[in-house]
Image: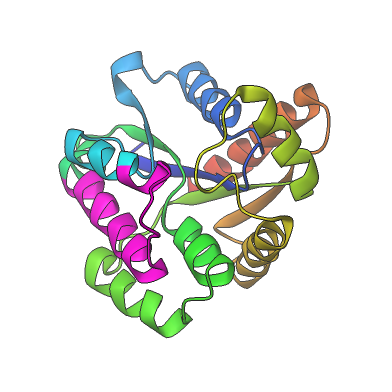
């Protein structure tokens, strides 16, 4: 099998970290060695991108303009793709990403209200035709996700937004999934963890059979 890029998306507290590990274990069971399975996150994943992540996540006395946020997201994404993701895929590795481009459509687009045409323009400049092979959208009511996030500890700048912000984001994820059901698969993340893992594994199994 050639290299793959599998992405996990979803609102805060949806269980993306656990899902990344579930995907990694699945490909390990398929015969991929540890050095052939790469885990990463957005924003972040490289030295430069992690510095941008710190700026995006931390509270500041200076309010960040939504367009600044959008541009920083794509700057970090571009660095990650060029430095890590594309070389890994080219060498036959499986890259599992905690968030990618769909998050900008949801968070900066639906959440912040940035016009989609502007996002698409930046997206085309940065990504061109580059897309994940498969995206798993973990869906659950924002109230549940935020309650989970609060249990993890101190909330970051995004997690402190109001519930309406996250309802817009959830709606955006689901709308985008409806547009491209072949590559965007919705997983009900409100189910018990064992059931979510089985659903992810079944989705991956179906994907591989179809791709193969």
Residue sitting at the far right = 191
What residue is rendered at 49% in x and 66% in y? 105
Residue 172 on the magenta segment: no
**Above or below — where is 150 with respect to 146?**
above
Q: Nearer the viewer, residue 37 or 169?
A: 169
Where residue 177 sits: x, y (%)?
63, 63
Residue 110 on image: x %, y %: 58, 70
Specify the segment rendered in magenta: 55-82
Q: Is residue 62 above or below residue 192?
A: below
> Secondary structure of the magenta portion, mostly?
helix
Is residue 129 left or right of 134 when viewed as pictured? left
Can the viewer see residue 89?
no
Residue at the spot x=26%, y=69% of the render?
128
Regarding residue 97, the answer to whether it shows in the image is yes
79 in magenta: yes
Locate residue 206: give its quadrant: top right
Residue 115 appears at what percent x and percent y? 47, 82
State whether residue 62 is above or below residue 38.
below
Dividing the picture into quarters, in which one does residue 198 lie?
top right
Please give left or right for residue 27 compared with residue 88 in the image: right
User: Quick one: 181 or 60, which is closer to the camera?
Assistant: 60
Point out residue 179 in the picture as x, y percentages from the top left corner. 62, 72
Q: How many marks?
A: 0
Say which of 201 and 8 sits in front: 8
Q: Give the residue at x 50% y 46%.
A: 157
């Amino acid at each position: 099998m050639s290299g793959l890029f599998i992405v996990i998306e979803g609102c805060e507290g949806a269980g993306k970290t656990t899902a990344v590990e579930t995907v990694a274990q699945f490909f390990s069971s398929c015969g991929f060695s540890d050095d052939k399975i790469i885990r990463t996150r957005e924003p972040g994943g490289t030295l430069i991108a992690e510095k941008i992540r710190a700026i995006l996540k931390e509270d500041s006395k200076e309010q960040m303009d939504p367009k600044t946020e959008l541009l920083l997201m794509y700057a970090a994404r571009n660095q990650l793709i060029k430095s890590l993701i594309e070389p890994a895929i080219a060498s036959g590795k499986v890259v599992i990403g905690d968030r990618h481009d769909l998050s900008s459509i949801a968070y900066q687009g639906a959440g912040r209200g940035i016009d989609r045409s502007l996002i698409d323009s930046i997206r085309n400049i940065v990504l061109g035709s580059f897309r994940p092979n498969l995206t798993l959208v973990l869906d659950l009511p924002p109230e549940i996700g935020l309650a989970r996030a609060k249990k993890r500890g101190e909330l970051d700048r995004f997690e402190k937004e109001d519930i309406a912000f996250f309802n817009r984001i959830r709606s955006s994820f689901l709308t985008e999934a409806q547009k491209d059901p072949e590559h965007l698969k919705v997983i009900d993340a409100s189910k018990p963890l064992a059931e979510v893992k089985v659903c992810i594994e079944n989705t991956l199994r179906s994907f591989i059979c179809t791709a193969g």
